[in-house]
Image (spheres, grey):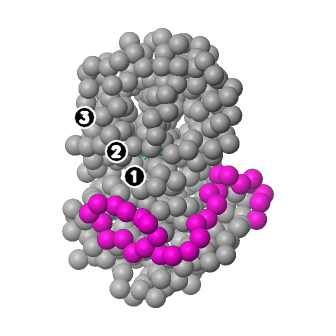
């Protein structure tokens, strides 16, 4: 039986929501690989929690997420870095594992890669954000060309090493998301409440169209959130908190559509496939991961990036979408089985080499 060590993100504990989509990706991958007979251990910051997973919790201070920093800012290491402590642990146990998989979008694991004797697979969860990170990733990618995995082609294209990336996509345990034919006249927005997600565009679209907007997710930037609340006092919006997958799909499936408004090049957008799995069409800006997921006119609408008018137009067109088509698209392209095959093939190749 192969033993694999997953190295989590250092920005927060698993299940806190601070890590965003990579938390769900890790959870799903652990479940699928265990089902296939792999022995998976996950190293993560203190207070991390996942059901049915072996987690080694590591003490230390969490890191600043790369997307909150400018491109040219040097790499920041906090005192008593949890990332450094996690990789110190990995160094001491590496002999027990056939493969280590890095899920951190941070400078240190790339730098450390050549110093390890166990092979390291790099799963990149975001598009290019920092010059120093691009530089170290590119250097390691040239040396270990098969070791870089990404979600989507659009994400890979943000990096200088786009051509060598394995495109792995994402997947869901579809049994956790219930399809609903029925819906109420309201919209959903989900994700981390942070500037790169441009929640304000969705709030404006809801304000103009007067269709209520339910907001789900971790408030990562409180100041940013308060600004939106003050700027749109009459918008029909309702913040529902950060929910578990079970509760989230329960509320989400009653919505008429999901608005996805990222200002950045979204690497994937797990929330898009979660909505589609419930039969909820997705209205998204036509760039990054969502543009590869949404079939315009069939499972939702792709609108001109940053155009609130485009969002409003698409909201009016939502009745044209057959909700059954949304669920079917996810069953065909984003099942845990199909996704697991791609990851397993990649892992096997790296273990064999
Ligand atoms: N999410 C959640 N509960 C909520 C709202 C969001 O668990 O109430 C999760 C959602 O399931 C998704 C993640 O937050 O996995 C957001 O990930 P996405 O890939 O859309 O964006 P990222 O945060 O990685 O940029």
The yes-or-no answer for disc 1 within 8 Å of ligand 1 is: yes
Which residue is under mark 2?
245
Real-space Cα distance between discs 3 and 2?
Answer: 11 Å
Residue 87, given in percent of the width and then of the height, sits at: 52, 78
> Marks 2 and 1: which is nearer the front?
2
Foreground of the two, 196 or 284: 196
The residue pinned by badge 1 equals 24
In the image, 257: left or right of 206?
left
Distance from disc 2 to disc 1, alpha carbons, whole Å, reads: 9 Å
Give the residue pinned by disc 3: 178
71 drawn magenta: yes
Q: Earlier in the sequence, mark 3 or mark 1?
A: 1
Ligand 1 within 8 Å, label 2 CB: yes
Secondary structure beneath dot 3 equals: loop
Judge from the rendering whether residue 309 lies leftward or rightward of residue 256; answer left or right: right
What secondary structure is found at the residue carrying circle 2?
A: helix
Could you tell me if the residues under marks 3 and 1 are in contact, i.e. CB atoms within 8 Å?
no
Q: Residue at x 38, y 12 (%)?
A: 319
Relative horizontal placement of residue 171, taking residue 259 as reference (left or right): left
Relative image position of residue 292 (x, y in whole percent): 47, 36
- In this picture, which residue range is highlighted in magenta? 46-74
Q: Does the magenta-highlighted stretch encompass residue 337? A: no
Image quarter in which the N terminus is found: bottom left
Residue 148, disc: none
User: Disc count in the image?
Assistant: 3
Marks 2 and 1 close (CB-CB < 8 Å): yes
Residue 269 in the image, given as x and y percentages of width and height:
48, 42
């Amino acid at each position: 039986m192969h033993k694999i060590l997953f190295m989590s993100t250092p920005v927060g504990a698993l299940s806190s929501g601070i890590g965003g989509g990579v938390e769900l990706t890790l959870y799903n991958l652990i479940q699928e690989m265990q089902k296939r007979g792999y022995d998976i251990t996950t190293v993560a910051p203190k207070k991390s929690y996942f059901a049915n997973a072996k987690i080694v919790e590591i003490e230390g201070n969490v890191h600043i997420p790369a997307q909150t920093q400018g491109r040219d800012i040097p790499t920041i290491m906090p005192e008593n870095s949890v990332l450094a402590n996690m990789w110190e642990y990995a160094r001491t146990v590496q002999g027990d594992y056939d493969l280590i998989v890095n899920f951190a979008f941070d400078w240190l694991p790339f730098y450390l890669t050549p110093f390890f004797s166990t092979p390291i697979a790099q799963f990149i969860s975001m598009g290019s954000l920092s010059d120093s990170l691009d530089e170290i990733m590119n250097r390691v990618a040239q040396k270990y060309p098969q070791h870089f995995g990404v979600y989507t082609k659009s994400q890979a294209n943000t990096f200088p090493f786009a051509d060598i990336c394995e495109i792995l996509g994402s997947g869901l345990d579809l049994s956790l998301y219930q399809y609903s034919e029925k819906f109420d006249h309201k919209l959903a927005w989900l994700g981390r409440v942070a500037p790169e997600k441009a929640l304000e565009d969705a709030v404006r679209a809801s304000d103009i169209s007067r269709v209520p907007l339910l907001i789900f997710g971790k408030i990562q930037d409180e100041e940013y959130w308060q600004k939106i609340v003050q700027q749109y006092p009459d918008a029909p919006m309702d913040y529902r908190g950060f929910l578990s997958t079970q509760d989230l799909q329960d509320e989400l499936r009653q919505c008429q559509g999901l608005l996805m408004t990222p200002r950045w090049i979204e690497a994937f957008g797990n929330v898009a496939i979660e909505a589609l799995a419930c039969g909820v069409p997705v209205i998204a800006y036509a760039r990054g991961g969502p543009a590869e997921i949404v079939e315009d006119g069939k499972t939702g609408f792709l609108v001109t990036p940053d155009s609130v008018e485009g969002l409003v137009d698409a909201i009016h067109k939502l009745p044209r979408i057959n909700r059954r088509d949304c669920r079917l698209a996810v069953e065909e392209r984003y099942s845990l089985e199909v996704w697991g095959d791609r990851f397993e093939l990649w892992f096997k190749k790296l273990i064999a080499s």
